[in-house]
Amino acid sequence: MRTIVAFLATSLLLFFSTASPTQASNTDDLFVVVTSDDAQTQMMAMVLATQSMRQGATVRVLLCGPGGRLAIADESFPTFAPAGRSPQELLRGLMAEEQVVEVCAIFLPNTEFGQEDLIEGIGTAMPPAIAEHMLRPDVRYFTF
């Protein structure tokens, strides 16, 4: 009985003390795709992206469909407690930290907006580059 208990204790100790590659470092890239028109959903996407960046992840944001409006410089968004900030303000914060933000390739040609309407620094994603990024094993993919 003592042998079994000792074995289980040792196994548990080894299990919990051995970090997996993703636990050992925060080198994973985070790919956040926002398609929702719901400002609260957009805000949560930006909050989680910001927190992930602060914990060491490289963040890439793709804004598509109604979510693409986050990229429009003159759009207004509600602010949310407790920070008193909007999703677009957090998006700009990610950009200030040199994280990549892009709109989908089909966003501008299918809306009334042009490149000149985008926040400075936001680019247009190219499908081959996005597909290559998504297929990388170190990229974690989240949609909102």
Image (cartoon, grey):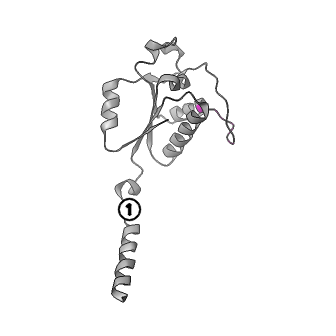
Callout 1 secondary element: loop
Q: Quick check: can you spot residue 89?
A: no
Residue found at x 39% / y 48%: 27
Q: Is residue 64 above or below residue 14?
A: above
Q: Report if residue 85 lies within the magenta region.
A: yes
Q: Report if residue 79 lies within the magenta region.
A: no
Quadrant where the N terminus lies?
bottom left
Q: Where residue 12 sits: x, y (%)?
A: 39, 73
Direction bottom: furthest residue: 2
Q: How many marks?
A: 1
Residue 8 in the figure: left or right of residue 51: left
Q: Residues within 10 Å of mark 1 (few under 14, many from 20)?
A: few
Q: Where residue 136 sits: x, y (%)?
A: 31, 40
Q: Is residue 93 above or below residue 71?
A: below
Q: Nearer the viewer, residue 30 or 67?
A: 67
Q: Where residue 84 sits: x, y (%)?
A: 69, 37
Q: Where residue 112 sits: x, y (%)?
A: 52, 11
Residue found at x 41% / y 18%: 106
Residue 57 in the figure: left or right of residue 69: left
Q: Nearer the viewer, residue 47 or 40?
A: 40
Direction front: furthest residue: 1
Residue linked to disc 1 = 19
Q: Is residue 100 above or below residue 104?
A: below
The residue stretch that appears in magenta: 82-87
